[in-house]
Image: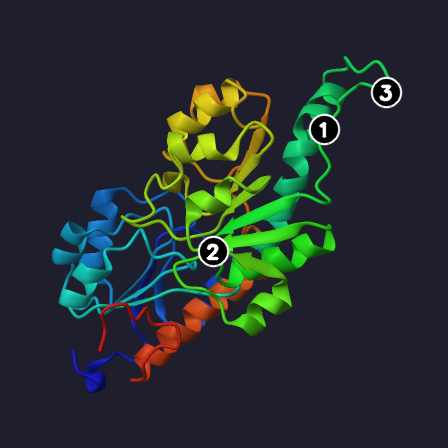
Amino acid sequence: MADTARPSRPAVTVTRALPAGVEQRMADLFAVTLNPTDTPMDRAALAAAMAEADVLVPTVTDEIDADLIAGAGERLRLIASFGAGTDHIDLKAARAKGIIVTNTPGVFTDDTADMVMALILAAPRRLAEGEALVRSKQWRGWSPTSMLGRRVSGKKLGILGMGRIGQAIAMRARGFGMEVHYHNRRRLPEVVERAVSAHWHPELDAMLTEIDFLSINCPHNAETHHMIDAERLALLGPHSYLVNVARGEIVDEAALVDALRDGRIGGAGLDVYAEEPQVSDALIALTNVVLLPHMASATVEGRDASGAKVIANIKAWADGHRPPDQVLEGWA
């Protein structure tokens, strides 16, 4: 579709309920179809929306694969995703069909980094166990040997994926007296390393043998799928803790359960899972893991900012401009 053919008031379908202010602004600007019940769309509903809309606004819960994109109507020229991740969209198929994909980077950086630090504290200090003990009315009062955990100050934190979020975590971890290590495909510029006081490890396995905490903050793709498997969990050792707020599929969940159950790692803090929203009974049965419902980005401020970016991307596209947050992998 040529720029001149872009509708000034495009038909926009939103797959999940968004903050009220965001939805109102969309209704003011676009011919928008909302999802007031917030019920996730099944495949048939997604296909129907993609057949009729000019713009689709999906979230991480919507799997937009090559077959759905192939069946999209000729009107669909923009997928303006609500959220930073794009692993739920087949970018290659979208590009082949001339569909622009945008995301909302940066708005959840501080929220996610805060949650990582919360889990870094919660897992070794056994916060979930302590809260459950009080609610059970079984607590019998303070004792010198009761609810003993591990301190975080003086410990080594390894960050897998040193983008915006990884760097924000590093800054926070230094405030807790932690020594920061990281593994990334590319080494950060020296000035950035100095700013966050981080040590680069070109080999992930070498880093895993040195650290006390592992924070997973890389995207999920073919290269990172089950990157943390049984062999790499063994490198961490029984004194170490794993925190994952990125994508559940980066960790071999069955291997993690075995390691936690057998005491081969000390504990874990998880906000994401391999088969969301299902969480395995084996994980739920463990007491040395803190389990959260994919809430690292769940702040009012972050969700409002994400919605504002979606609107800006749609508006720029409708006005004939390149959206500011176009995902450019493979584009000229």
The answer to whether any part of residue 300 appears in the image is: no
Percent coordinates x, y for residue 30 in the rendering: 37, 71
Task: Return the disc, 2 or 1, that comes first in the chain's sequence.
Answer: 2
Residue sitting at x 65%, y 60%: 171
Which kind of residue does numbered mark 3 sit on?
Pro
Percent coordinates x, y for residue 249 in the rendering: 36, 40
The residue that mark 1 highlights is 149
Residue sitting at x 32%, y 65%: 12
Vertical placement of residue 129 versus 159, above or below? above
The answer to whether any part of residue 32 appears in the image is: yes
Q: Residues within 10 Å of mark 3 (few under 14, many from 20)?
A: few
Residue sitting at x 41%, y 59%: 82
- Relative side of 125 to 139, left or right: left
Q: Residues within 10 Å of mark 1 (few under 14, many from 20)?
A: some
Task: Return the disc, 3 or 2, that comes first in the chain's sequence.
Answer: 2
In front here: 64 or 234? Answer: 234
The residue that mark 3 highlights is 144
Task: Return the disc, 1 or 3, that comes first in the chain's sequence.
Answer: 3
Measured in 3D between alpha carbons, the distance from the residue under mark 2 to the one under mark 1, in whole angstroms, is 39 Å
